[in-house]
Image (cartoon, grey):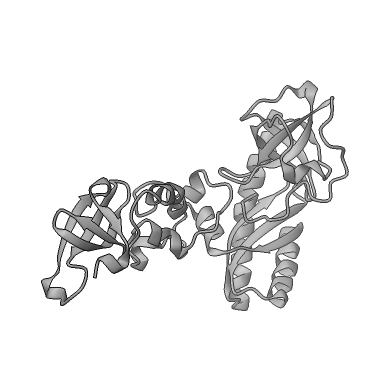
Amino acid sequence: MTQANTNTPNESGTEPTASNTNTLVGVRFQPAGKPYHFAAPAALSLVADDWVVVETVYGEQAGQVTHLPDAPPDEVTSRKLRKVLRRATGLDMARHFVMQQRAERLVEVAQEEVETHKFDFKVISAEFTLEGSSAIVLCTGNVSKKDFATLRRRVSSRMKCRVDLRSVGPRDHAKVLDGFGVCGERRCCARFLTEFQPVSIRMAKDQAISMAPSDITGMCGRLRCCLAYEHQVYKEEAKELPRIKAHVKTDRGIGRVIDLDILKGDVIVEIPPHGPRRERERFRYPAEEVEVVPRNRGR
């Protein structure tokens, strides 16, 4: 499943947590998808990248082992886990491949119904369980409960299966579409991000990144996920530098800090700190070559 499937496959599970005869394993259902935790019989001797068949709330599904944690994460210690039923066989993988092809047809059928009924949303992906009796369809756009009910009924009738519709946001949409970002690399969300972290304008400001939408907005139309990658480093390094608007003593006299080059450890100083703008000059100094002075001494 994609990350947008917010109800974990373990939800409402009835099986016991990993014990002496069980091994806790993380399993994902899509590349770069969020891993969910299952209890696997220790006799299976699973390792990362093994394909397995697991029991989920939707039915049996094939997924790939991502990791075997030494201890259950906090979010799974107090709830019960569903089982890894078996290591995936050749037949299981063949069925998985057939269901992927059937899912492509389901997307076509669902989008036909959307266009026929002039719904204001788009179908972006679908996924079947191994037995083919249930499917999850992801949609994005202005989705109402009435439209969902109509689409679910029509698609279920045409595809002869139970259909569960999910509405996802623009980031999940971009993850499914894949592609390349403005950096030239494959999109982070499709390549390795298993969960989306909060991203704020403050992160861009702390890193002195241009506020132009083209510089801070991703292909999804939201703030770029990569703004969060180095934010903590910038915050830590900035603690060692004078603050913006601070008055500092330089070899040219008292000036006012107007900008920071955090990674280089430099400050941009405007001298003099007051007066007509045409009379001020800007200079770059290493932070250790300036001394912060109280504001009243700079006047």
At 84% across and 43% down in the image, what residue appears?
80
Residue 141 placement, left or right of 216: right
Residue 271: quarter of image: bottom left
Residue 21: quarter of image: top right
Residue farthest left in this picture: 279
210 and 237: which is toward the camera? 237
Rendered location of residue 65, percent (x, y)? 66, 33
Rendered location of residue 284, percent (x, y)? 19, 54
2 and 136: which is toward the camera? 2
Q: Is residue 94 visible?
A: no
At 67% across and 55% down in the image, what residue appears?
5
Residue 286 placement, left or right of 116: left
In this picture, is 6 found above or below 277?
Answer: above
Rendered location of residue 74, percent (x, y)? 73, 43
Residue 159: quarter of image: bottom right
At 14% across and 69% down in the image, what residue appears?
280
Total residue callouts: 0
62 and 269: which is toward the camera? 269
Residue 281 placement, left or right of 184: left
